[in-house]
Amino acid sequence: MHRLVVVVVVVAVVALGPACGDDHGAQAPTDGADVTDSGPVSSCDPPGHFGGAPINTFVLPTSSSTGFGYVDVQAAFPQVDWQTLDRLYLPAGRYTNIEVGNLPVRTPDRPLVITNHGGQFFIGDNPTGNYLWSFHGGANWILTGRYDADSQTGDAAFPGHACGKYADAAGTYGIVSDDAYAFAAPYLHMGIAVSDATDFELEYVEVARSGFAGIRLLNDAAKLGTNRPMANVKVHDTYIHDTAGEGYYFGWTGAPPSNLQPHLEIYNNRIVRTGNEALQIQDLGDGSHVHHNTFISGGLRWLDNGLGRYQDNNAQVHTRTGTIELDHNVFIDGAGTLLSFFSAPQAGDGPRHVRFHDNYFSDAISLGAGTSNDGSTFEFTNNTFRALQFAYTPVDPAATDPGIVVGRNPGIMDAVTFTANHWAGSKKLINPAGNVTTTDNVNDTPPTIEFVGGVGVVWSSPGHHLTSWAPIATVADTDPAVTYHPGDVVTYGAIPTLYRCTTASGGATPVESPAAWIALPTPSDDVRVLDTSPYATYGVR
């Protein structure tokens, strides 16, 4: 969600063909340890990712019959040497909540690895509690559900997407947070929340059906009384799906101060079907890099969004200082815009240079615009934009089609460069201005992207293709009734299930009106791009 007071908004759109193809992906990007994180079905991560067998281990005991509540885990277990502990094990089982606070400050050469032990570690279904998963404190720790026999992490029965097993991987990860929409109030539970920490890593976890964001990262400057950076954070190889709010919600969207996030790296993640933005990241600092991710169907709740209008984009990116790069990502299906881009420095921040290159943008029904501060330069190179379809009037009758793919507010006075981008349709790429340089951009018909598996929607026409079913559009001023037409696809229920409309319908749910709706198969969510595609190096690998 955003309560921002600033900036630029970029929007792009595309239509996709039906997902089809073979059963493998291309070689994966590597992480900081130069180890393949995933890849072709025929290959698996090499063993020993976290070194050999651990020497010092500790299994975290439950503090109640339902979960773990340790505000200060070091004080709770003084017998543990928290500086030499190799593995903090989370015992297999189903629990409603976990809090682990005052995690230790370790060194980069000897991080604390936190992983599941003896099977799957599951947190969820906490209808009366005010949180689901809370980690806070420390540095140089890793939360992982990765199965690695040599390093003794994870469990062989719960490998997640390892060895390319992306298809139907829901429920197979070693660490799962699944709230089943059991929140006591809308927008309450974060699937996984991390605060008052820095220099940590999250990987091989699944978050489903959280009441608010899937993963929330924030060092609360107001609570801490200082602008403490959350630096050098890696989030990769996660599977976030079917959330009521955002997929990722990193940083602070309120008034300053907020924690800077330098050297944030987000890669090889798939985030699909989110009520608000699939990707919402703020306070990006120097060295931040977002690459090789797939974000599909954000803004599902564009008709009845409890946060208000314009909280329904596919992605929202807010930068503060330094050089920042976003590349080889796939952004598909948003209500407001595909990429709502802001630049908003705080006191002491320097200039920004933000580069978007080699990204695929597809299918949205509105453009956005904002303002930017001086001292920022933005570059868009070799991106693909397709199938813009303006259709935002159901929630904003006064909205009009701006006739462009990328919106630039006149307040942006610094250099904006567009080079070798491709876009489809009759709209202009961007309005001309003295500070806008356009070179070798091509208005043509770029090929559609094709996936190994599917997400349950056929991208045969432009627009916003997946919506959370609602009887009335409460975001609109007059709360008009919603009528669904043949071909519309919605999500409904706590599972949730996808339904395709066959006869004009309104008021009655898909369950109450079976003659008007057909239940669709559960999507496989294998969103690796086919090797034969011109975008084969994009998205999750």
Image (cartoon, rainbow, N blue to C red):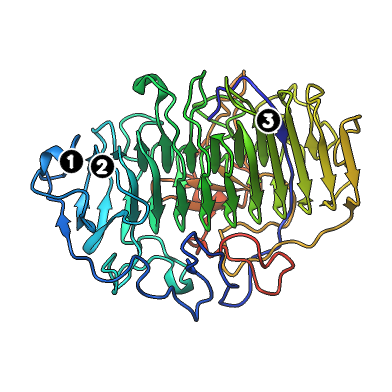
The residue singled out by tag 2 in the image is 103
Amino acid at pointer 1: Val
Q: Secondary structure at mark 1?
A: helix
Q: Residue at x 44, y 39 (%)?
A: 213
Distance of label 3 from label 2 (alpha carbons): 34 Å
Residue at numbered disc 1: 73
Give 477 or 201, whichever is nearer the viewer: 201
Amino acid type, mark 3:
Pro
Closer mark to the observer between disc 3 and disc 2: 3
Instruction: Give the left or right position of residue 457, taking residue 406 as reference.
Output: left
Residue 123 left/right relative to 225:
left
Q: Are the residues tagged 1 and 3 within 8 Å (C-beta)? A: no
User: Measured from the top left, where is residue 26 in percent x and y?
Assistant: 60, 73
Is residue 129 at least partly visible in the picture?
A: yes
Which residue in the structure is indicated by mark 3?
351
Against 207, is 148 above or below?
below
259 vs 500, nearest the viewer: 259
Mark number displayed over residue 395: none
Q: Earlier in the sequence, mark 1 or mark 3?
A: 1
Measure the C-alpha gap from mark 1 to mark 3: 40 Å
Of callouts 1 and 2, the N-terminal one = 1
